[in-house]
Image (cartoon, rainbow, N blue to C red):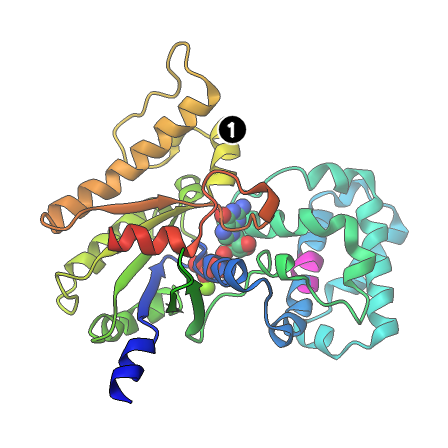
Amino acid sequence: MGVYASRFAKPKRHFLFLGLSGSGKTTIIRHLDLDERGNVDSEIRAKSSNILRWRVLKRVLFLADHCLVDLSENLLSQISEIDVITYDRLLEMGNEELKNLGHQIIKIVQDTSIQSMTLLPGKSYEDNADFFVANRYLGDLELIFEEAFIPSTVDMLFIRQPTEEPLELQVLLKGPHEEETLVYLREIGGQTHLQGEWVEEFSKQNLDAIIFVVSLDDYRFESTTGEGNRLAMSASLYANILESDAMNLELPTLVIFNKLDIFGESITRTNLNVCSLFPRVQDSLEGESEKDRCDRLIATIVAHFRGIHESLRPRMRFRHLLSTAVMTDKDNRGEGCLSLTKIVNEIQG
Ligand SMILES: Nc1nc2c(ncn2[C@@H]2O[C@H](COP(=O)(O)OP(=O)(O)O)[C@@H](O)[C@H]2O)c(=O)[nH]1
Ligand SMILES: [Mg+2]
C-alpha cells in the first residue's frame, strides 16, 4: 500500500507570487489556470460582472467630466444623475434598471468628443488600468448591462480586483509523458499594508519558489502615494524580499516581466528616461528597428533586476521570463505568452 501510495502520489509544487499591486499576479495565475483547465469557475465569474460594469461606468463618467463644455444640457443632467450611483446601489439593481443604466451610458459614449477621449491613455497608473478595460468594452455596453451577463473566461483576465484575501489555485500540470504534478499558485495581496504578512509566507517549509511579478509598463508611472516611480518601487521591493531574514537562501526566485504588450506601445510614446532608475538610456540607435529598440529597452530593465539579484544572491542563478498575461487566444500565442510548463522548467532548470 505504502509503495503504491508513494509511487502514484502526484508530486507537488508550491509557488508564491509577490510583486507590487497591479503588476499582474492575479491575472497571471488565472491565465495559467485557464491555460491548463480551459475555464474559470462560473461562480467567480458571476460575481465579477458588477466589477466590470462599475469600472466601465466610472471611466465613462471620468471622460464625460473632461469634456463637459462640449456636452448638451440634456446629456449633462443625465451625467449628474448617474454620478450619484454608488457601487452598493449597482449591486442592488434589477434587470430593467441595469438596462436603463446601460442605455444612458451608451448615449454618453455616443457623444463624439468622448469617443475621441477614450483613445487617450490615462496619466496615472489607476486611470490607465481603467482606460484599458473600459476601452475594450465600450462597444459591448448593451451586453454587459444585461442582468444575465456573465463574463467569459477571457473577460475575467481584464477584470481588475485588487487581491485582499489570499488567492490560491491548484493546477494539475501534465508533463510530456502524461505524468502529473499538482502546482499550487498562491498570491497574497500586493498592497503595502499587507507586505508584512509576506514574511510569514517565506518561512513555510513546503515553498518551492517565489515568483516576483514586475509590470514593465510601470516605468512611466509615479506611485499615487508619493513613493516615487513604480518601476523603482518594484526593484526595491525585489531587493527587500531577497534581503529578508525570513527567506531561505536556497529558495529559487523567478522574475516575470509582465505587460510586454502595453510596454511595446508605451515605449513608442514615452521615453524610458522618465523612469529615475537608470542612467540615461539612448532612446533609439541609428538603423535600429522598432522591435530591436523595444528588446533593448526591456533588456535594460531586466539587467537592473539581474544586478540586484546578483549582488544579493551571488550563488543563485537569476531566472526570468517575459510575459503578456491578458492574451489567451490559444491559436495566437505570441511572444511572452506564459505557460506553467515554461515556469516550472525555468525554476527547475
Ligand atoms: N495589457 C496588459 N494588461 C495586463 C497584463 N497583466 C495584467 N494586466 C492588467 O493589469 C491590471 C492589474 O492586474 P492584477 O492581476 O489585478 O494585478 P495584481 O494586483 O498584481 O494581482 C488588470 O487590469 C489586468 O487586466 C498584461 O500582460 N497586459
Ligand atoms: Mg491580485
At x 30%, y 50%, the residue is: 346
Q: Amino acid at mark 1?
A: Arg
Q: Position of residue 133 (x, y in %)?
A: 63, 52
Q: Which residues are magenta?
A: 53-58
Label 1: how many Cα within 10 Å (few below 14, some 14–19, many 20+): few
Compared to 113, does 14 lie above or below? below
317 lies left or right of 9:
left
Q: Nearer the viewer, residue 144 or 102?
A: 144
Q: Position of residue 151 (x, y in %)?
A: 69, 64
Toward the bottom, the furthest residue is 1
At x 58%, y 62%, the residue is: 38
10 lies left or right of 49:
left
Compared to 277, does 36 lie above or below? below
Q: Nearer the viewer, residue 333 or 238?
A: 333
Q: Position of residue 182 (x, y in %)?
A: 38, 70
Type of secondary structure dominating the magenta stretch? helix
* Residue 49 visible within the image: yes
Compared to 327, does 177 lie above or below? below
Under 8 Å from ligand 1: the CB of mark 1? no
Q: Is residue 93 magenta?
A: no
Toward the top, the furthest residue is 287
User: Can you say which quadrant of the picture contains the N terminus?
Assistant: bottom left
At x 45%, y 42%, the residue is: 336
**Disc 1 designates what residue?**
269
Toward the left, the furthest residue is 315
Compared to 303, does 254 lie above or below? below
- Mark 1 residue element: helix
Q: Position of residue 110 (x, y in %)?
A: 84, 45
At x 34%, y 71%, the residue is: 194
